[in-house]
Amino acid sequence: MPEQRDEGKMMIVIENDWLKVHIVRHGAEVRKVTNKKNALDYMWTGDEAYWGRVSPVLFPIVGRLKEDQYQLDGQTYKMSQHGFLRDVKFDVAEQTSTTVSFVFESLGSFVHVYRYEFKAMIRYSLNEDSLIVQWQILNENKEEMYFSIGAHPAFKVPLVENEPIEDYHLHFTPAVNKNVMEYELKNSFIHEKGTANELSTIPLTNSLFARDALIYSNIDKVTLVSNQSRHGVEVMFQGFPFVGIWSKYMETDGTIAPFVCIEPWYGIADTYDTTGNLKEKFGVNKLGVGETFQAEYIMKFH
């Protein structure tokens, strides 16, 4: 199926009877999701006045490194927040009317900031009113590979015109038989706050993100929903070690941007007391020679 031009940008479109999804090759990023049953668009518009992205893939780091650098086997590398995969052009490996697979192979293009060679594969597929996102990272080195990967989808709030944000709430589904840990960001770095007792529902308010993102471990699902219209989105990510919830806080008027991000992560920003050694980084993943890392999360739009 050929690419389709939409709003002046080259888009790849997949759709079924429930959803129509627009994705760009740049970062293999989902830019628009329309529910055909209710005619609502669920994704943030990418307005640069607030935040110019919509659903970037974070790799090979999540969040910020201390002094924007890390050490690996005695060498120092510079890397900006969230890494570089969100800004590469992916190739389309396979496409049907309801699925598309993207692939990017490093081939030495990032050795100045990340010495490991890898192949990244991102697959999107539709199942009724849900979009399934699957990641694969292949280690193409003769040594173990260290990395983080995360999602950063932003959803419009409000979804229905003229609804106040106070009509919305976040509902958390903890992992079974695990303690939910809560973290906070101070100057972009992670501090552990301790066990999050009785975490279930948080009302959306303008002040919720005044101190930056909400971050937890051992959560399986986060739901963002309107108390009035009942429209919303469920993000399901069983097995992911971390999740961040974020919107841009506007200090000028004490409001938040008209979106909320629900971000499943295999990785996290540097802790305030990090050594800077990538192999010792909190939450980092280790992948053996020739092995493939796989993960999946699902977004349900209702």
Image (tube, rainbow, N blue to C red):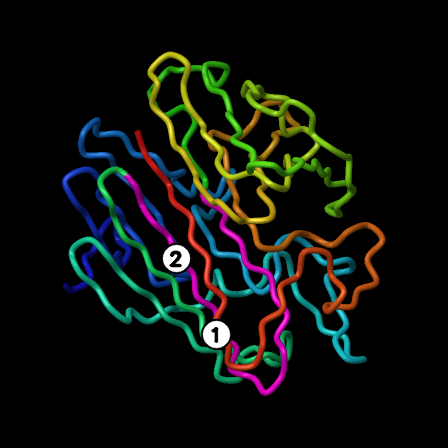
* Mark 1 residue element: strand
Identity of the amino acid at label 1? Leu
Question: Residue 300 bears which disc, if any?
Answer: none
For the point 62% across and 25% down, the residue is 199
For the point 39% across and 57% down, the residue is 134
Q: Say which quadrant the N terminus sits in.
A: bottom left
Magenta stretch, residue numbers: 130-153
User: Is 133 one of the magenta-colored residues?
Assistant: yes
Q: Nearer the viewer, residue 63 or 132?
A: 132
Left/right of residue 99 with respect to residue 161 in the rendered view: left
Q: Which residue extends farthest front? A: 177
Residue 202: image x %, image y %?
Answer: 57, 21
Q: CA distance from mark 1 to mark 2?
A: 13 Å
Question: Residue 138 bears which disc, if any?
Answer: 1
For the point 62% across and 61% down, the residue is 61
Q: Nearer the viewer, residue 14 or 49?
A: 14
Question: Residue 134 bears which disc, if any?
Answer: 2
Image quarter of residue 255? top right
User: Is 260 one of the magenta-colored residues?
Assistant: no
Q: Which residue extends farthest bottom? A: 142
Residue 271: image x %, image y %?
Answer: 77, 51
Residue 230: image x %, image y %?
Answer: 35, 18
Residue 7, compared with residue 286, is above or below; it is above
For the point 59% across and 79% down, the residue is 116
Left/right of residue 108 with respect to residue 43 in the rendered view: right
Identity of the amino acid at label 2? Gln
* Mark 2 residue element: strand
Which secondary structure dominates the residues rendered in magenta?
strand
Image quarter of residue 38? top left
Q: Nearer the viewer, residue 92 or 236?
A: 236
Neighbour tally class for label 2: few under 14, some 14-19, many 20 plus, Cα within 10 Å: some
Q: Say which quadrant the C terminus sits in.
A: top left
